[in-house]
Image (tube, grey):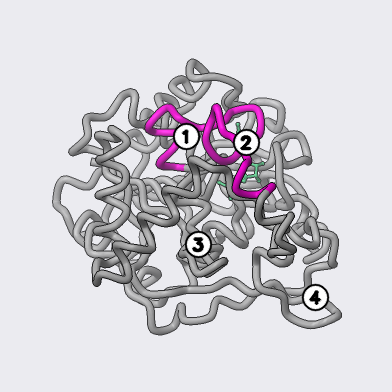
Amino acid sequence: MIVALAGGVGGAKLAHGLARILSPDDLLVAVNTGDDFEHLGLHIAPDLDSVMYKLAGLNDAVRGWGLADESWAFMDALARLGGEDWFSLGDRDLATHVERTRRLVAGETLSQATAALAAALGVAHRIAPMSDDPVRTWVETPEGALPFQHYFVRLRCEPVVTGFAFEGADRAVPAPALAAALADPALEAIVLCPSNPFVSIGPMLAMPALADALAARRVPLVAVSPILGGAAVKGPAAKMMAELGVPVSSAGIAAQYGALLDGIVIDAADAADVAGIEAGGVRVLAAPTLMRDAGDERALAEAVLGFARGIERRAP
Ligand code: GDP
């Protein structure tokens, strides 16, 4: 059994590859909720939705977020009313947020609401939020701290980043499915998907209870680098690394995760980084890591599993 920790798009692609080769009981995808927010009275969970839509085969691969075959009548009508239209919600996507919010208001946990939505969309594999407790990412900038979606969507990641805060993380505990999977004797490995290390994996590691569970693991933990050839495939990961003084490379990703890693999968184009990372005691696999289609996703998932199963947990 494998636990994959994932953010949005990069995480969803590897999760999809893993789901192609692991049975539903053998995979748990635990997803970042640090960029969840309340908007128009709705609970929006962008990374959970990216993973759920991808595993359901309903995602829009061109736009990179939301549902395929989407329409925008709601946004057009909202804009006409002078409503808050900086965060786009497609008509079909809107139903997800309304139904999630209805379930939460009725007393379900985010885990329960997520499981119900995923099942309704035909997802067989298990998807869980990282936690049922609210964790909210703030992006620190010279002009002050910004809620994550204001930085990411409203300001298009333009402000310089000086750090992050994860409100509520100190009190948050891993979701029940994640805690159980990490304690399961059948657990073989933990995979950090190619996701933003600061704002997708960072909020998870900021939960002391999850950090402790990861530190107590007996199985190897391997990351897949989201940086290829000195650049991110998409999103602000490389910009954030540069602004924070972290080398924009797979070696920088390895350094960012530090002692947590037993192994890292980096792109074959970055093979020059192998020796430097291995000198720090982390095992490295250099392999093609760009996932352009389902074949790439599956091939990378197979490489990651083969690598993780062939290495051991470093002595803590
Ligand atoms: P977000 O919430 O949609 O930004 O999603 P994530 O945090 O999961 O993913 C963002 C990261 O995924 C970026 O840093 C990208 O470089 C990385 N990424 C996206 N697609 C790929 C891919 O095909 N291969 C690899 N190695 N990284 C990817």
Please report whichever mark, 1 or 4, sits nearer to the chain's N-terminal start.
Answer: 1
Q: CA distance from mark 1 to mark 4?
A: 31 Å
Amino acid type, residue under disc 3 in the picture: Ala
Pointer 4 local density, CA inside 10 Å: few below 14, some 14–19, many at least 20:
some
The residue wearing badge 4 is: 141
Q: Is mark 2 within 8 Å of ligand 1?
A: yes
Q: Which mark is residue 14?
A: 1
Q: Mark 3 and ligand 1: say if the CB distance to the nearest ligand atom is below 8 Å.
A: no
Image mark for residue 259: 3
Q: Secondary structure at mark 2?
A: loop
The residue at 16%/54% (across/down) is 184
- Distance from Cα at disc 3 to Cα at disc 2: 32 Å
Q: Main secondary structure of the magenta part?
A: loop
- Nearest to the eye among marks 1 and 2: give it: 2
The quarter holding residue 125 reads: top left
Q: Which residues fall within the magenta stretch?
A: 51-76
* Left or right, 5 with reference to 110: right
Separation of disc 1 and disc 2 at Cα?
A: 14 Å
Check if residue 118 falls in the magenta segment.
no
Q: Position of residue 83 (x, y in %)?
A: 69, 64
